[in-house]
Amino acid sequence: METTLVILKPSAVLHGYVGQIVQRFQQKGLVIRGMKMMQLGEPILREHYAHLTDRPFFPDLLKSMMASPVIVMALWGNDAVNVVRMMTGATNGRKAQPGTIRGDFSVSGQENIVHASDSADNAEIELKRFFSPDEIFDYQPSWLKYTYEPAEMK
């Protein structure tokens, strides 16, 4: 079992897609261990997107990510990183398969609705960037025993 970070970007917030997207994650059986709305500023975005700061589109990315508050979530489940990545689809919404979040809600490479951690190691780093330890809760909803077989709960 692992926890991953998801950011519902301004393109999701401003279009009013937050509820539909959160519902998809919950219907899949992922547990929300932390969730909050926050306004991202340039310092945290420069840290989060450090691998992109020298790219020509970075100023537009900054502007886009600061256009409104975002929703950050800590999602927990078996193989959560890969499950969430499969659900989000290809980075460019035009190339994402129908049925994925980006495939259903985006037609852009930048305005692509959601950020999802790409590995368990990066999820750990990103979760610490956006959440303090007291904002992530360790609990198991009663329905969980009907979501996984006992061997999958380890």
Image (spheres, grey):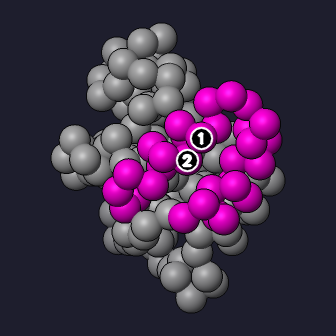
- The residue under label 1 is which amino acid type? Pro
Q: CA distance from mark 1 to mark 2?
A: 5 Å
Identify the residue under disc 1: 59
| Magenta stretch, residue numbers | 41-70
Q: Amino acid at mark 2?
A: Leu
Magenta span contains residue 93: no
Q: Residue at x 30, y 28 (%)?
A: 105
- Is residue 135 left or right of 35 when viewed as pictured? right
**Picture residue at 42% right of the left edge, 69% below the top:** 38
- Direction from residue 111 to residue 49 in the image, left or right: right
> Magenta segment, principal secondary structure?
helix
Question: Disc 2 on helix, strand or loop?
Answer: helix
Quarter occupied by the N terminus? bottom right
The residue sitting at 44% across, 31% down in the picture is: 112
Residue 54 included in the magenta stretch of the image:
yes
Quick check: 105 above or below 134? above
Within-10-Å neighbours for mark 1: few <14, some 14–19, many 20+: few
In this orientation, which residue lies closer to the viewer: 134 or 110? Answer: 110
**Quadrant housing residue 79:** top right
Say which residue label 2 marks.
Answer: 62
Percent x, y of residue 151? 63, 53
Contact, mark 1 vs mark 2 (Cβ under 8 Å): yes
Q: Which label sits on residue 28?
A: none
Residue 132, position as x, y percentages in the image: 61, 82
